[in-house]
Amino acid sequence: DAGVTQSPTHLIKTRGQQVTLRCSPKSGHDTVSWYQQALGQGPQFIFQYYEEEERQRGNFPDRFSGHQFPNYSSELNVNALLLGDSALYLCASSPTGGLGGYTFGSGTRLTVV
Amino acid sequence: QQQVKQSPQSLIVQKGGISIINCAYENTAFDYFPWYQQFPGKGPALLIAIRPDVSEKKEGRFTISFNKSAKQFSLHIMDSQPGDSATYFCAASEETAGGTSYGKLTFGQGTILTVHP
């Protein structure tokens, strides 16, 4: 049973560009959350998707947007990249609408130059 | 009120010793307290979790102690092994059905554990 899969694993972008990160949740999971983990820090909540809608959002600007598809997979989009967006982006899925714990993927390492 | 404070930032123990990591929270609505283990280049993996209706939970060499009145919880790793060397994160969430948090995790800053052979 595959866990949470994220793609790509690494990405290098130029400041001002746009990026799309992808996540396939663990089989049977219906809720996807995205977290940003800066180097040496704990993950910070970006937003959560359930039933193809953004259900709640952390303290991130509108440059960060997302989508959830009918098969529960999800995308994270970041526009107008800043150097400070360089981080590990983690996708986490949950089987019960967000309750009962989350399983994390290995993340996408984004470097903005 | 959403913060979770974790200490120490780093910890070095000898093989066979006890590793202790502490966390404190402010939001009394939190009702689920997981600990995650993260190796370099990997995402956090759930290690053990506790809910406030119990004061202690043990799984193998890992034990969570929970003090609801003090709003503190800690992870104890008994008989620490070099393979336990990783970054450990405490976290907290509000999981009550009907609440508005939907299990959003608030993480501590992490503790880098090094176990010397």
Image (cartoon, helix red, strand yellow):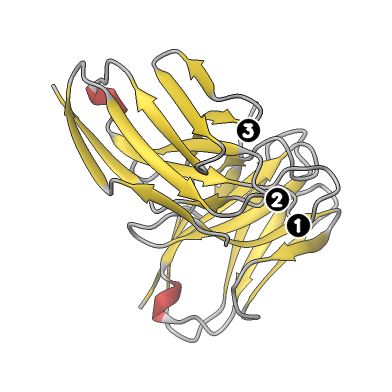
Q: CA distance from mark 2 to mark 1?
A: 5 Å
Q: Secondary structure at mark 3?
A: loop
Q: Is residue B90 above or below residue B51?
A: below
Q: Residues within 10 Å of mark 3 (few under 14, many from 20)?
A: some
Q: Residue A112 location, x and y as percent?
A: 40, 75
- Above or below, A78 relative to A36: below
Viewer-proximal residue, A106 or B37?
Answer: B37
Identified at 55% across, 54% down, the residue is B26
Residue A32 is marked as 2
For the residues labelled 2 and 1, say whether their Cβ atoms are less than 8 Å apart: yes
Task: Write the residue at 37% across / 26% down.
Answer: B76
Q: Which residue is mark 1?
A: A49
Residue located farthest toward the top when viewing the structure as drawn: B60
Identify the residue position indicated by label 3 in the image.
B52
Left or right, A52 with respect to B90, comes to right
- The alpha-carbon separation of the residues under discs 2 and 3 comes to 25 Å
Q: CA distance from mark 1 to mark 3?
A: 27 Å
* A38 shown above or below B72: below
Residue drawn at 30 percent across, 27 percent down:
B84
**Does A19 appear above or below A33?**
below
Name the mark nearer the viewer: 2 or 3: 3
Q: Are marks 1 and 3 in contact (CB under 8 Å)?
A: no
Residue B33 at x, y = what percent? Answer: 57, 38
Left or right: where A87 falls relative to A72: left
- The amino acid type found where label 2 is placed reads Val
Q: Quadrant of residue B63?
A: top left
